[in-house]
Structure formats: structure tokens, C-alpha cells
Amino acid sequence: MRKLTAWVYKSALGDSSNNGISHNYDSVVCYWLDHGEKISDINDVENNTVVFISRTLFDKYCPIFQPIKPVLPNHVGYMSGGCFISSSDSRFSEWCGLNAVPLHDRQETQAAYDMHFD
């Protein structure tokens, strides 16, 4: 398991995280899980702890970070709140494959989520 602290980068206008981690913290504790490791293997979880998720969408590498805490009951999430995570530590870009990675820390109730599509 790999770990380092990184910065949250948000628009000068603020964030759209709906009171997510990026609204409350300027830095996050990032974890990268190695083969066979699970979120439950992380000890001493802080409120600003996130985990790296490597994913591919439409044949394009699109990793994200998301909080390790479960989504609130009756909420849809996690989704992008418009912020990114990065670090000047060279291990960050080595482990992510990018210099900055989106933070998916926004949660909404199902009703609020459905209003976006009316």
C-alpha cells in the first residue's frame, strides 16, 4: 500500500462538491492499493482520506480519487465536484500516470440527482 499527502486544487469560484472533502480540506491523504489490498486494510482513516481508482473510459485512461468513507444512505455518489488532486512529490505522477487527477467527492440525494435530468 502506498500513501502520500497531496493538495486539492479548485476553481477560484470555489468547489461544487456539495460539502465534500474538497469543500472542507485543502489537502488529502492519498492511498494507492496494491494487488489484493482492500480499503478495509487502511488503518487510522482520517476525514480527508481518498483512494486512487484506475479506470478506462472509452479506451482512454481516466483515473480518479474518491473518499474511502461510504456514500451516505439514500445518496448517489461519488461524482466529480470539479476539483483536482496533485502533488509536487514525483511519486504522485509516477503512481497516477498523470500530474493531476480529478477528485470525485460530490454526493447527492437521488431526488437532487434526478432534477439534473428533468
Image (tube, grey):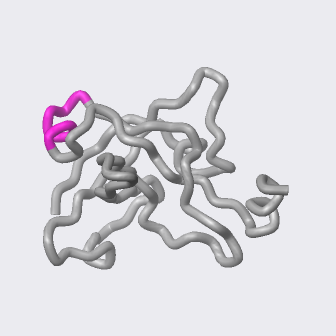
Give the side of residue 51 with respect to residue 70, left or right: left
**In the rendered image, the vertical position of residue 78 relative to residue 28, given as above or below:** below
Q: Please state which of residues 25 and 90 is positioned toward the viewer in this rendering.
A: 90
Q: Which residue occupies the extreme front position in the image?
A: 58
| Residue occupying the point 34% across, 34% down | 100
| Residue occupying the point 78% across, 56% down | 117
Across the whole image, how many numbered discs are drawn on residues?
0
Locate residue 16, reporting x and y percent: 65, 41
Q: Is residue 99 visible?
A: yes
Tell me the quarter of the image containing the N terminus. Answer: bottom left
Tell me the quarter of the image containing the C terminus. Answer: bottom right
| Residue occupying the point 32% across, 78% down | 40
**In the rendered image, the vertical position of residue 33 relative to residue 74, given as above or below:** above
**In the rendered image, the vertical position of residue 10 relative to residue 76, given as above or below:** above
Locate residue 14, reporting x and y percent: 64, 30
Locate residue 4, reporting x and y percent: 23, 47
Query: How would you classify the magenta stretch by its main secondary structure?
Result: helix
Residue 93 part of the magenta segment:
yes
Locate residue 27, reporting x and y percent: 41, 40
Q: Is residue 29 visible?
A: no
Give the side of residue 109 with respect to residue 3, left or right: right
| Residue occupying the point 44% across, 37% down | 84
Residue 80 part of the magenta segment:
no
The span picked out in magenta is 88-94
Give the side of residue 3 with respect to residue 19, left or right: left
